[in-house]
Image (cartoon, rainbow, N blue to C red):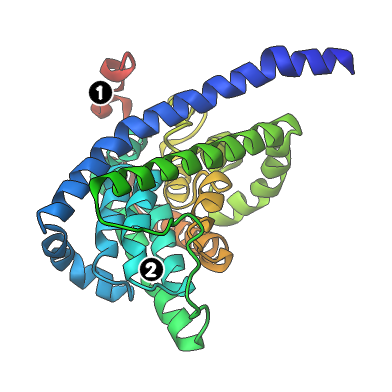
Amino acid sequence: MRQLFNQFFHSTLPQLAREIYEVCWLLFKIMIPVLLVVKALEEFGAIPYISLALEPIMQLVGLPDSMGLVWTTTLLTNIYGGMLIFFQLAPQEHLTVAQVTVLSSMMLIAHSLPIELRIVQKAGVKIIVALLIRLLSALALGMLLHYSYQWADWLQQPVVLIWQQPVTDNSLLSWGLNQLKSFIMIIVIITALMSLLRFLRWVHIERLMIWLLQPLLKLLGISTQATSLTIIGVTLGLSFGGGLLIREAQSGHISPKDCFSALCLLSLSHSIIEDTLLVMTLGADLSGVLWTRLAFSFVFVAIMTRWLNRTSKTFQHRWLLNTPDNTGIGRLNAN
């Protein structure tokens, strides 16, 4: 017991603290410039014009125009960046739980595109295909959830914004203090999530996930050789697990077709624990951000793999797959 205690305080805890610091520092380096740009756009009255350009898309999924800016920020940065913009704009919109669930589901499928699309490309999927899968799937799932909730009159109660601080004035000082509070809350959330993920790895939850996923992958048309690739993405996500994903895809143990199918699944449902818990802090309901998203992903991949089996290898390599010869992987390994 004493040995475990010493190991925790002298090894595990410092390592966890270092990981939390590195993640927070990386995120804040991205978020702070985005926040300053958004604040400048708000001060100069540009947000209504940006929202107007995104209005048709937001109308398709039953969201206010301003939520288009939240999703755009999420697409270009990450979920954390979108969350910060969300908490700036949401109080004036009086959103329902259904609307937040729709927005959160779209954010979960399509976010961090500049980074994650590059990872998927290096792992073996053409970047334009990966982009279309992320964007069109996010819109399709958003529309499905919107019309389902509207038809069933479900989750129509106002959402409770647990992070939002009451704004007493519109000064830059007040805005800065509110952002500082949001940063502190993000640090708390990251600390809790990374501690939980470390505990799950410590109790070998990934072994249970492998056992559960193997029959499902077979049903979806993905070979068991792709299990490790899928587990990496499901647990770590595309950004955090990017290096491992690329290495696994390049190992030669997985066929290009199975790699493509597995990456399609991961594009729609990755970092399933952390990201799901994260958007639930916005007030999203589990029915959309987890269960419906998983069902949507499984159906999509099952259809995709069966269609892929009917196509020729020439078609696959020309339009869908990146091979080591055309990805420039050898040149990029040092990056």
Please indicate, yes or no, whether residue 130 appears anywhere in the rendered image: no
Going from N to C along the chain, the mark reached first, 2 or 1, is 2
Please indicate, yes or no, whether residue 109 appears anywhere in the rendered image: yes
Q: Secondary structure at mark 2?
A: helix
- For the point 47% across and 62% down, which residue is it? 161
- Label 1 crowd bin: few (<14), some (14–19), many (20+), radius 10 Å: few
In the rendered structure, find residue 155 and report the number of the disc placed on it: none
Q: Position of residue 251 (x, y in %)?
A: 48, 23
Between 147 and 9, the residue placed more toward the observer is 9
Between 141 and 287, the residue placed more toward the observer is 287
Which amino acid lies under the numbered mark 1 shown in the image of this protein? Answer: Gly
Q: Secondary structure at mark 1?
A: loop
Residue that badge 1 annotates: 328
Q: Position of residue 279 (x, y in %)?
A: 49, 54
- For the point 50% across and 33% down, which residue is it? 254
Outermost residue, front side: 168
Rounded to the nearest angstrom, the CA distance separating label 2 from label 1 is 35 Å
Discs 2/1, front? 2
Residue 276 higher or lower than 8, as above or below: below
Q: Is mark 2 in CB contact (under 8 Å) with mark 1?
A: no
Q: Position of residue 25 (x, y in %)?
A: 40, 27
- For the point 48% across and 54% down, which residue is it? 163
Between 272 and 100, the residue placed more toward the observer is 100
Q: Quadrant of residue 192?
A: top right
Q: Classify residue 199 as left or right of residue 116.
A: right
Which amino acid lies under the numbered mark 2 shown in the image of this protein? Answer: Gly
Residue 173 higher or lower than 57, as above or below: above
Residue that badge 2 annotates: 142
Outermost residue, right side: 1
